[in-house]
Image (cartoon, grey):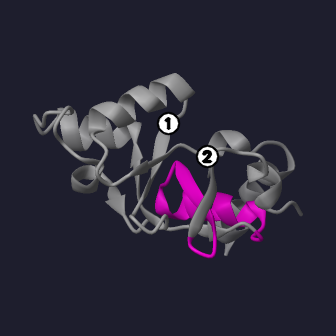
């Protein structure tokens, strides 16, 4: 079974501080063609996550100004994470059970990458579907 480290090795996740604005985050997400930002505190540790869905629900729908709203005000604080040495199926389970689209991968509290459902295919998805079918029959 593959480890998450195999998916994030060499990855350069989009990291921005809590003080960054939503506008800066949206532009960085567009430029990097990613759907999320890992938000870090002054110590470099993961403080939260901000996604495209957050931009719509917590900023646009609420009438907030993206040029002045900081990520700290609209991010999901203290998101669920997984260590890089966890298995890929653990990330899929977490996303499935909790309704996430993105899971930050950390090493000693420091963000080292992020995985989304699009990172998984074949064996990983087959195993998750098999497990879900087993639980449905119990």
Residue 56, given in percent of the width and then of the height, sits at 28, 35
Q: Please, is residue 42 above or below residue 122 in the view?
A: below
Front residue of 70 and 118 = 70
14 displayed left or right of 40: right
Residue at which label 2 appears: 116
Residue 45, given in percent of the width and then of the height, sits at 49, 67
The quarter holding residue 5 reads bottom right
96 displayed left or right of 46: right
- Quadrant of the image containing the C terminus: bottom right
Question: Which residues are the magenta region?
Answer: 85-109
Q: Residue at x 10, y 34 (%)?
A: 63
Callouts 2 and 1 close, C-beta under 8 Å: yes
Separation of marks 2 and 1 at Cα, in angstroms: 9 Å
Q: Please, is residue 64 above or below residue 106 in the view?
A: above
24 displayed left or right of 83: left
Tag 1's secondary structure?
loop
The quarter holding residue 81 reads bottom right
Residue at which label 1 appears: 35
Mark 2 or mark 1: whose residue is earlier in sequence? 1
Q: Residue at x 57, y 58 (%)?
A: 104
């Amino acid at each position: 079974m593959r480890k998450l480290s195999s998916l994030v090795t060499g990855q350069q996740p989009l990291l921005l501080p809590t003080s960054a604005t939503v506008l800066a985050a949206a532009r960085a997400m567009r430029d990097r063609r990613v759907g999320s930002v890992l938000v870090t505190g002054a110590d470099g540790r993961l403080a939260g996550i901000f996604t495209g869905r957050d931009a719509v629900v917590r900023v646009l729908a609420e009438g907030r100004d993206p040029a002045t709203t900081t990520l700290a005000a609209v991010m999901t604080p203290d998101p669920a994470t997984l260590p890089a040495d966890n298995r890929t199926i653990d990330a899929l389970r977490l996303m499935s059970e909790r309704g996430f689209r993105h899971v930050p991968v950390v090493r000693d509290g420091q963000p080292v990458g992020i995985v989304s459902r699009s990172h998984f295919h074949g064996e990983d998805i087959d195993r998750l579907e098999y497990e879900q079918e087993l639980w449905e029959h119990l």
